[in-house]
Amino acid sequence: MPEILDQARAQVLETGVGLDEAGVLAVLTLPDEHLPAALQLAHEVRMRWCGPEVEVEGIVSLKTGGCPEDCHFCSQSGLFTSPVRSVWLDIPSLVEAAKQTAATGATEFCIVAAVRGPDARLMKQMREGVAAIRAEVDIQVAASLGMLTQEQVDELVDMGVHRYNHNLETCRSYFPTVVTTHSWEERWETLRMVRESGMEVCCGGILGLGETVEQRAEFAAQLAELDPHEVPLNFLNPRPGTPLGDRPVVEGKDALRAIAAFRLAMPRTILRYAGGREITLGDLGTRDGLLGGINAVIVGNYLTTLGRPATEDLKLLDDLKMPVKALSATL
Amino acid sequence: MSVPDPTTVGGDVPPPWCDRCGEPARSGPHPACAAARALEPPRFCARCRRRMKVQILPAGWSAVCVEHGEFRG
């Protein structure tokens, strides 16, 4: 057994203290023959510190495309020659999306907008949309609207938004290679305000942007320092027309190593499968990740791409005897 | 208005444009587009090549061409 897994068993499993950057790097560079043991340990850590429940979430884009930022992975940037056109979702469709999500048994519904930060029009749409959902659908509402001012943070709290997503996307040292129109530190500042407001912090990123394995470890350590309630883990799905459109997808075993490593860095967080798992891991890999540290999933479609049918994920959870977290358990 | 999936518009006759990349569809196969289509909605109208307004919901999608109307999946 590699020394790092013995160390992780004693430290993470027994005491709940996550691995540091060097420890994460050691897991990320484990030879293939030790990957099953790493996943098994990460699963034990998840079961010990989080329990068997899986949190299910659906997401929808309230405002698609036309974003002024240049996140090199994103097909919604207005600066690239992506085929994605700008479109707004109306309130009845937003409520319908929330109903579709709730029908899967999901407890979380995240409203997302492709913006640098919300303007008055978007905040008005949010206020009306969140009120309409809360009146008709029994589900927790989260939001992801880019960088916020303190006033906007306070307004979202007042609306009843209980969790805010703002991904750091990648480690601090690599971020300027991926985004040039704003800084990692500006994102961190929004996350600080969100935390202080009492909203739950949801912060993760995308693997496969061209970062090194050392930078992957750096990212895990920086997320652990932030200590978010939830970490959505995406794998790059290269989008036509974007600067990263020709990048290869993350190799399945590397994705699984990352899942185990991120779990061992953050034993208590909600570690969520987000975009890209279908092309990176496929059905078998999706199962391996759920038995390797993942304890939350986005079901159904994503913002600009399609996911597996929710029924397939729910059947998989049933096969694995992993109960879907109930709404009462999130309140 | 709801019409068939744009990849099948025209019945047995292939549509003139690829609904994913917007390039001519009759000049040869588009294997990458065909593979990607399982996890992507159409972006271009297969009849006229216009970029469509696409809205994705958790359990479906709609794509609107200003000339040829709405497609759903």
Image (tube, grey):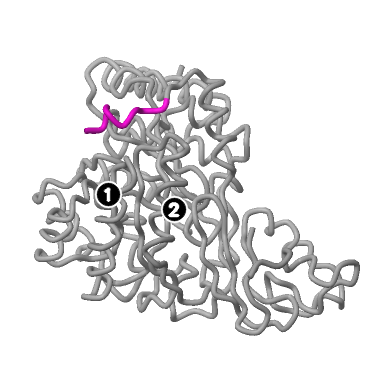
Q: Position of residue A213 (x, y in %)?
A: 44, 47
Q: Position of residue B68 (x, y in %)?
A: 68, 80
Instruction: Tell me the number on the disc at residue A135.
Output: 1
Compared with A107, A329 (above or below) is: above
Nearer the camera: disc 1 or disc 2: 1
Instruction: Considering the whole magenta stretch, tell me its main secondary structure.
Output: loop
Label whose residue precedes the other's in the sequence (1 or 2):
2
Instruction: Tell me the number on the disc at residue A25.
Output: none
Label 2 marks which chain's residue? A
The residue positioned 74% from the left and 79% from the top of the image is B23
Q: Position of residue B63 (x, y in %)?
A: 59, 69
Q: Is residue A114 left or right of residue A165?
A: right
Q: Which one is in front, A36 or A326?
A: A326
Q: Which residues are magenta?
A: A324-331
The residue positioned 49% from the left and 79% from the top of the image is A80
Instruction: Tell me the number on the disc at residue A97.
Output: 2
Disc 2 secondary structure class = helix
Compared with A304, A137 (above or below) is: above
Magenta residue check for A2: no
Q: Position of residue A96 (x, y in %)?
A: 44, 54
Q: Which one is in front, A243 or A110?
A: A110
Compared with A238, A59 (above or below) is: above
Q: Which one is in front, A272 or A258?
A: A272
Compared with A190, A88 (above or below) is: below
The residue positioned 45% from the left and 74% from the top of the image is A87
Q: Give residue A237's quadrant in the image.
A: bottom right
Q: Is residue A192 left or right of residue A245?
A: left
* Quadrant of the drawing holding the C terminus of chain A: top left
Name the amino acid, label 2: Ala
